[in-house]
Image: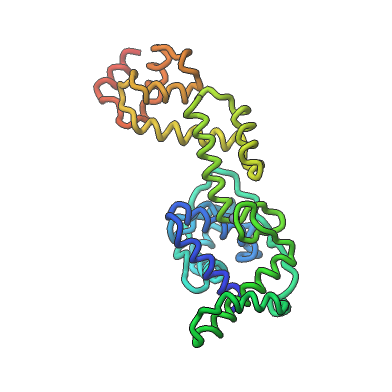
């Protein structure tokens, strides 16, 4: 078994344990990290936006490349599968989509020094491998030992290339990263949850104050604690909460909370006037649209 095959198997097993949403995000991160390695000369022409099940959404700023993508997609899909999951295709389609964020700054391949065949294990390392399979039936021992030793070699090669343990688990990660891909995605979700919690407790909290709090709580994600991220978490929360409020409701806790969130106001500064005006301006994002008649009349009245 070669190194990518072994790593591929380990990677697939970790993915299978996760819920689909988290799986998509981790797979995206994995593709993102290998982008230069997979696409080489084409890597700057387009960029990954997200993964949805077996579909990879990509975007490009180059219109002629978008045409090429239509014809080249099957080849590109194959390249990704060969790299990320050689045993079982993990992506089946590439689609063009729109990214509303700036193209991410892609990470160029990190060089690991030696070829896997040049890595030698010490007798102690080999006997660690042998101990792991001590209880395995004789006929499967040889194959399993080979697999384990190749995996150990791959890990050793990474350590020699400056890879180190992830801050949150035992997996190895590249020299300039603090977290492995799986933990990175999980920590990002926690970060988003922490921002939401602050807004739920006190929607009027200034962004700078939120930023300071989350940097303290997530020092390993400092680069990601941006004001844009805070605003995006607030907008998500607003749209999600608005979906639970009916047009005309100006008195329920949910409705007044939504107004506080939109206007970033403490409860004591809310007035009937502010609540009504805000919900009116926001009516098309609520659970149901205003009754047609009322909408028409209000237009004529002005
Ligand atoms: Zn980790």
Residue at screen point 43% across, 22% down: 259
107 left or right, relative to 17: right
How far from the left and from the top, in percent, is residue 133? 55, 78
Image spot of residue 30 (x, y percent): 57, 59
Front residue of 42/218: it is: 218
The answer to whether 291 is drawn above or below residue 152 in the figure is above
- State the image coordinates of residue 209 (x, y, percent, origin top left): 62, 27
x, y percent for residue 41: 66, 64
Quarter of the figure with the C terminus = top left
Position of residue 13 relative to residue 289, above or below, is below
Question: Can the viewer see residue 201?
Answer: yes
Residue farthest toward the left in the current orientation of the protein: 293
Name the residue: 55% across, 41% down: 191
Ligand 1 falls in quadrant: bottom right
Residue at 69 percent across and 59 percent down: it is 164
Query: Can residue 96 be seen in this snapshot?
Result: no
279 or 135: nearer the viewer: 135
Image side of residue 8 versus residue 163, left or right: left
């Amino acid at each position: 078994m070669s190194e990518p095959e072994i790593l591929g198997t380990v990677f697939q097993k970790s993915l299978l344990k996760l819920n689909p949403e988290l799986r998509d995000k981790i797979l995206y991160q994995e593709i993102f990290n290998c982008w230069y390695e997979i696409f080489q000369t084409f890597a700057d022409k387009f960029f990954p936006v997200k993964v949805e099940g077996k579909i990879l959404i990509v975007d490009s700023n180059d219109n002629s490349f978008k045409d090429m993508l239509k014809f080249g997609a099957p080849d590109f899909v194959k390249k990704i599968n060969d790299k990320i999951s050689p045993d079982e295709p993990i992506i089946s389609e590439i689609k063009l989509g729109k990214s509303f964020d700036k193209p991410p700054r892609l990470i160029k391949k990190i060089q690991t020094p030696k070829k896997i065949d040049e890595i030698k294990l010490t007798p102690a390392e080999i006997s660690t491998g042998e101990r792991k399979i001590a209880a395995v039936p004789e006929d499967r021992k040889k194959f399993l030992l080979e697999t384990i030793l190749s995996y150990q070699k791959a890990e050793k090669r990474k350590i020699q290339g400056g890879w180190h343990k992830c801050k949150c688990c035992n997996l190895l990660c590249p020299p300039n990263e603090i977290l492995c891909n799986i933990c990175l995605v999980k920590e990002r979700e926690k970060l988003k949850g922490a921002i939401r919690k602050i807004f739920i407790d006190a929607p009027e909290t200034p962004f700078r104050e939120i930023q300071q709090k989350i940097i303290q709580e997530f020092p390993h994600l400092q680069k990601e604690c941006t004001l844009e991220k805070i605003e995006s978490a607030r907008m998500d929360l607003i749209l999600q909460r608005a979906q639970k409020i009916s047009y005309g409701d100006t008195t329920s806790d949910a409705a007044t909370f939504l107004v506080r969130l939109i206007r970033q106001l403490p409860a004591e500064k809310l007035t009937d006037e502010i609540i009504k005006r805000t919900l009116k301006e926001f009516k098309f994002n609520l659970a149901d649209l205003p009754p047609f008649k009322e909408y028409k009349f209000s237009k004529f009245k002005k």
